[in-house]
Amino acid sequence: MMVSIRMENIEIARVLAETADLMEIAAEDGFRIRSYRNAASVIEGLGERVASILKDPGRKVTDIPGIGKGIAAVLEELEERGTFARRDELLEKYPPTALEMLHIQGLGPKTIALLIETFRISTLDDLKRLAEEQKIRTLPRAGAKLEEKILRGIEQYRKSAGRFLANFAQQTAEELVTFLGAVPGVERVTPAGSFRRAKDTVGDLDLLVTGPGAEAALDAFAGHTKVQEVLAKGENKASARFGIEGIQVDVRALAPEHFGAALQYFTGSKEHNVALRQRALKMGYTLNEYGLSELEGGAVVASATEEEIYGKLGLAWIPPELRENQGEIEAAEKGLLPELLTLADMRGDLHMHTRESDGRATLEEMAETARGHGYGYIAITDHSKALAMANGLNEERTIAFAERVRGMDQEGLGIRVLSGIECDILRDGRMDLGDEALSQLDFVVASVHSYMNLSSEEMTERYLRCLENPFVKVIGHPTGRVLLHRDAFVYNFETVAAEAARRGVAMEINASPERLDLHATLIRMAKAKGCKFTISTDAHHPKHMANMQYGVRMARRGWLTRGDVLNTLPYEEFRSALRK
Ligand code: DGT
Ligand code: CA
Ligand code: CA
Ligand code: ZN
């Protein structure tokens, strides 16, 4: 018999996913690449070890859905020697940095292959130097633009490496809450940290476990099949890298009497906690993860719930989204915390795409899903013609499609459907569609999708000019940021927000987890300038409508109440609240 390596599923999944990335750089067949990625995700979630199935003569790995003959051969080879021929060949040809390079915005697999083959680079620093020394522009079809893009991309990548989007964190948190909750004797599993504060991205996940089974939960976690590497394990805490993506998860076991103090402490933010501790000291207390105690004598005065702790400090309980030391403690002291809006307040979704442009579903399917979310209305906002890549609509198609939307609205489907458009704002601030077409629509979202690197002056002018168009109701994803990939546009947001408020144009909070745009700071700034908001998902598929929760949480981080957000209103009131 052969010696066997007995790799864990998670290692196998990671190797397969990595190989798929390398195959992409090597420009291999897309179908094969997908089969590797698919196999990786199937194996990552498999309840049973691949190694055991391989060992059992009565069974075949090809019986696992998603595993074909090709992958089966790879799995056998992996089991025998921990790697396989195709992967070895790829690794010989491309340095490990190639995998990192795939994460750099603006660098496609083809360019990466060309760069590696031409310059034999092996690190990101090599690549950076090449771009700085302006050597990349000598490549076919490359130019100074690509060098700039690479430099920006590397900076962005280094800044965001090791952070994860909120929806990914949510998925992982839900999976682990279920898993740990099923350990006998576990009473409660509660996410804390930046995830609980609803930050747009999280560095790691922090989970708190209570109950007599809490310590056993740490063992179960460390032994979870999707754990890549246990980083630390003690009586009270286990940390590990989890899943193919390797997100760090910290699990802490607590006694129930400390739960409130621990939840408060590990929810953070650090800045909020520092301010709260100073307040405690001034009042003659100390505050740590075990409780709030008297400085003299050490008697514990509160520790089981957050409410008691905030209460003893003379404060109303502060929603986690506000805990950034941005005035929330003062507001809690004076009883001036806002009554934050909730997901249940939302009555419509006002930014979505259908097959008419680059969406994946029909008008009818989108409306049907929206009804399932309990909404009273939606706006259909496909792209305008400047986005040719997205099959954007010209004037003629806009008018014809609006006709179809109106027809549908009149069918009485139990949901009102507004005819709309996401109209591009051209470089000079004019709208991509003429007034005649725009005037026939119920709802115009104006968005920037091009010339994103204008000077601050030009970009500010561009937005101000766009606001002059009387048909514009909302500014879509107002800063253009793409989380972990692209920074916000640089312009004078305060000036634009003030002008939008003056003209009755609302600011969008784009709920897509890749954008979350506006973010909290700018939401508060816009609100201070008098702006109203919409929260919309920018759905390109019915399932994206479920992303509303992320937009609402961002709005909460921006201190918004129901009254600040137009699409919390019932249909008629909403229509009359829109810019005239
Ligand atoms: P992340 O993970 O980078 O997205 O951000 P957080 O806020 O989840 O940070 P993390 O995971 O390092 O710690 C979770 C919370 O625990 C943090 O928000 C506050 C608290 N904490 C952790 N370490 C310290 C510390 O050294 N001092 C204070 N005051 N609080 C801490
Ligand atoms: Ca964290
Ligand atoms: Ca942590
Ligand atoms: Zn857009």
Image (cartoon, rainbow, N blue to C red):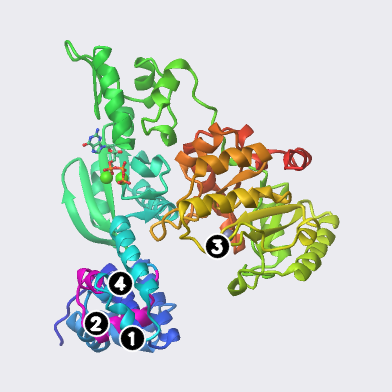
Dividing the image into four quarters, tell me where ligand 3 lies.
top left
Judged left or right of residue 350, residue 172 is left
Looking at the image, which residue is at 34% across and 63% down? 152
Q: Is residue 287 magenta?
A: no
Badge 1 vs badge 2, beta-carbon distance below 8 Å:
yes
Front residue of this view, candidates 515 and 264? 515
State yes or no: Cβ of the residue under disc 3 lies below 8 Å from any atom of ligand 4.
yes
The range drawn in magenta is 106-130
Disc 3 residue type (three-letter): His
Residue that numbered label 3 is attached to: 449
Residue that numbered label 4 is attached to: 101
Disc 2 residue type (three-letter): Tyr
The answer to which image quadrant residue 305 occupies is: top left
Q: How far separated are the C-alphas under marks 4 and 1?
A: 13 Å
The answer to which image quadrant residue 184 occupies is: top left
- Mark linked to residue 26: 1
Looking at the image, which residue is at 17% across and 10% down? 296
Q: Which mark sits nearer the N-terminus, 1 or 2?
A: 1
Q: Which mark sits nearer the N-terminus, 4 or 2?
A: 2
Q: Residue 303 location in percent, x, y? A: 30, 23
Disc 1 residue type (three-letter): Ala
Q: Residue 424 location in percent, x, y? A: 62, 61
Q: Does the magenta stretch include residue 113?
A: yes
